[in-house]
Image (cartoon, rainbow, N blue to C red):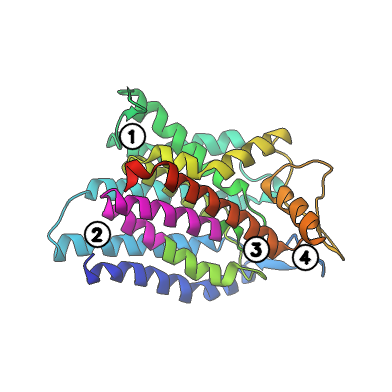
């Protein structure tokens, strides 16, 4: 990769890094703050929707990448796909931000409304007929862009924020998953997808410095929707749907556990003097499983350890996926 292509990656990191604190201050001024749920020292209000900074940093980084391709490299390859990707991510991020403003405590946007609005985020990929219509050796024809793409977009976008509610969890999961897909993209000859994912990854790394325990800012749906749809889009454009679905196994399990609770049970734990406890009698998320495992192993669960354990599980799934799909990757 030419050294100049590191410019958008570094730029996105720096914009995110130096803008987060300003967002935190502004969010507190306008009352865009949320409770930090897993703390024993009482309710603490933390700046919300910090993902808007990551989204803006990503947007600028990708535009700089396009400028380098156009004016320096004299290369117009994949520009239509890049603009379609950027448009879809911005639409999804905007929907997530609206959901944040409505407030998760008050229910936010209804499930039907989210699904309806996110279908619009799939339209840019539909109109360019993105990806390959052959899956598992089956030719889907028009069914692929008109049905499978919207389902994949809506599914990944709405479920990525299911594993959430703990300091640093959403951002670190995004970094891990996007890094894995970036590696696969690079190895399969889709270096342009890999670079775009790196732009988001480095924006997230800067955000994570303020979001890890104890968090100074929360990501909000504006970030989780942006990451979720980017995962789906990269999988479609890079023709790596199968391995991406495998990497998404923790989220598939989370969806199953959430359905068990009628999609109404929260992932939060209940903080006590002896660490985190499961607030329900049953398990309704990987977070609750992590709490139970930590209590059995160590006798106590902390918020940081729950995040680390879930991330370790995600990394294990990715490593297994790389082994199982190695023939199609390496």
- For label 1, the SS is helix
Other residues around mark 3 within 10 Å, as few (<14) / some (14–19) / many (≥20): many
Say which label, 2 or 4, has the lower sequence index: 4
Say which label, 1 or 4, has the lower sequence index: 4
C-alpha distance separating marks 2 and 4: 43 Å
Is 8 positioned to the left or the right of 23 in the image?
left
Q: Which residue is mark 1?
A: 126
- Residue at image x 55%, y 60%? 172
- Residue at image x 72%, y 33%? 260
Say whether marks 2 and 4 touch (CB < 8 Å).
no
Q: Which residue is mark 3?
A: 167
Q: Identify which residue, 141 or 126, lies in the foreground.
A: 141
In magenta stretch: residue 173: yes
Of tags 1 and 3, which is closer to the observer?
3
Please determine whether, in this image, residue 1 is positioned above or below residue 14: above
Where residue 86 sits: x, y (%)?
35, 51
- Residue at image x 55%, y 41%? 249
C-alpha distance separating marks 1 and 2: 22 Å
């Amino acid at each position: 990769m030419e050294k100049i292509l590191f410019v958008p990656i570094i730029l996105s990191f720096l914009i995110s890094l130096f803008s987060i604190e300003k967002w935190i201050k502004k969010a507190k001024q306008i009352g865009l703050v949320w409770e930090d749920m897993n703390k024993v020292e009482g309710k603490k209000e933390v700046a919300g929707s910090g993902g808007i900074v990551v989204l803006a940093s990503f947007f600028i980084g990708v535009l700089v990448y396009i400028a380098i391709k156009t004016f320096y490299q004299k290369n117009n390859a994949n520009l239509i796909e890049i603009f379609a990707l950027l448009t879809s991510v911005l639409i999804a991020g905007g929907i997530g931000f609206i959901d944040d403003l409505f407030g998760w405590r008050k229910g936010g946007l209804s499930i039907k409304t989210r699904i309806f609005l996110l279908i619009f985020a799939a339209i840019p990929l539909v109109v360019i007929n993105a990806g390959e219509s052959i899956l598992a050796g089956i030719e889907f024809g028009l069914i692929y862009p008109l049905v499978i793409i919207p389902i994949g977009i809506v599914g990944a976008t709405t479920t990525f924020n299911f594993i959430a509610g703990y300091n640093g969890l959403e951002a670190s999961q995004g970094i891990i998953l996007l890094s894995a897909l970036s590696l696969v993209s690079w190895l399969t000859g889709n270096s342009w997808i890999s670079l775009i994912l790196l732009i988001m990854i480095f924006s997230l790394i800067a955000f994570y410095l303020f979001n890890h325990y104890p968090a100074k800012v929360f990501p909000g749906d504006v970030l989780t929707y942006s990451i979720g749809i980017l995962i789906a889009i990269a999988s479609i454009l890079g023709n790596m749907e199968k391995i991406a679905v495998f990497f998404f196994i923790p989220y598939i399990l989370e969806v199953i556990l959430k359905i068990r609770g009628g999609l109404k049970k929260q992932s939060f734990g209940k903080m006590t003097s002896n660490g985190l406890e499961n607030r329900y009698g049953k398990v309704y998320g990987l977070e609750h499983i992590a709490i139970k495992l930590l209590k059995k192993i160590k006798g106590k669960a902390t918020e940081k350890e729950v995040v680390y354990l879930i991330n370790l599980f995600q990394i294990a799934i990715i490593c297994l996926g790389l082994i199982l799909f190695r023939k199609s990757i390496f």
